[in-house]
Image (cartoon, rainbow, N blue to C red):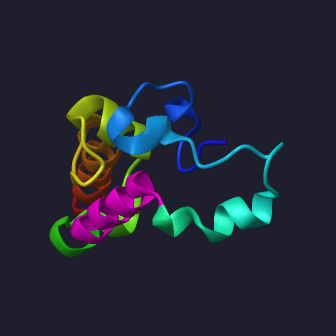
Amino acid sequence: MVLLSPELADTAAPEYGDFVAGRILDRPLPGILRDAHRLRYVRDFLTGLDRCQAECEFFDFCRGAQAANRYFENGDLTTTESNYCRVSRQALSTLATKEAVA
């Protein structure tokens, strides 16, 4: 089982234990979820999410973007911005704000 983003499944990432949170055949789902905070990739994503909330003016709209985009675009889950966010969230929010003012 992979948490945060299904796109991370089958991704080779030794630094994150290949994003595996556990096997539901070996352990019940509630136990896997209860221990999710111990996984490095979950902790790193939450660090990035906290940074997004503190630093980004678009956070209220995007809520911190997508874990897979952060990893595949930046190679790091602690980052705060991805191209996906810039194009699909920030640009849309900026356009909507300009239209509302006009």
Residue 81 lies left or right of residue 1; in this view the side is left
Task: Name the spot of residue 70 as percent of width and height, x first.
Answer: 31, 41
Q: What is the magenta range?
A: 39-52
What residue appears at the point 49 percent right and 40 percent down from the top-left corner?
19
Whether 79 is drawn above or below 25: the answer is below
Task: Name the spot of residue 45 as percent of width and height, x first.
Answer: 36, 57
Whether 28 is drawn above or below 87: the answer is below
Overall secondary structure of the magenta section: helix
- 49 within the magenta span: yes
Whether 13 is drawn above or below 20: the answer is above
Whether 28 is drawn above or below 5: the answer is below
Residue 88 in sight from this viewpoint:
no
Residue 70 lies left or right of residue 35; in this view the side is left
Where is residue 46, by image quadrant? bottom left
Task: Name the spot of residue 67 as percent of width and height, x first.
Answer: 41, 46
Task: Name the spot of residue 93 as percent of width and height, x first.
Answer: 31, 53
Where is residue 86, by image quadrant? top left
Of residues 21 and 69, the one drawn nearer to the viewer in this rendering: 21
Residue 35 lies left or right of residue 57; in this view the side is right
Of residues 39 and 8, the one drawn nearer to the viewer in this rendering: 39
Q: Say which quadrant the C terminus sits in.
A: bottom left
Residue 59 lies left or right of residue 51; in this view the side is right
What residue appears at the point 30 percent right and 44 percent down from the top-left corner?
85
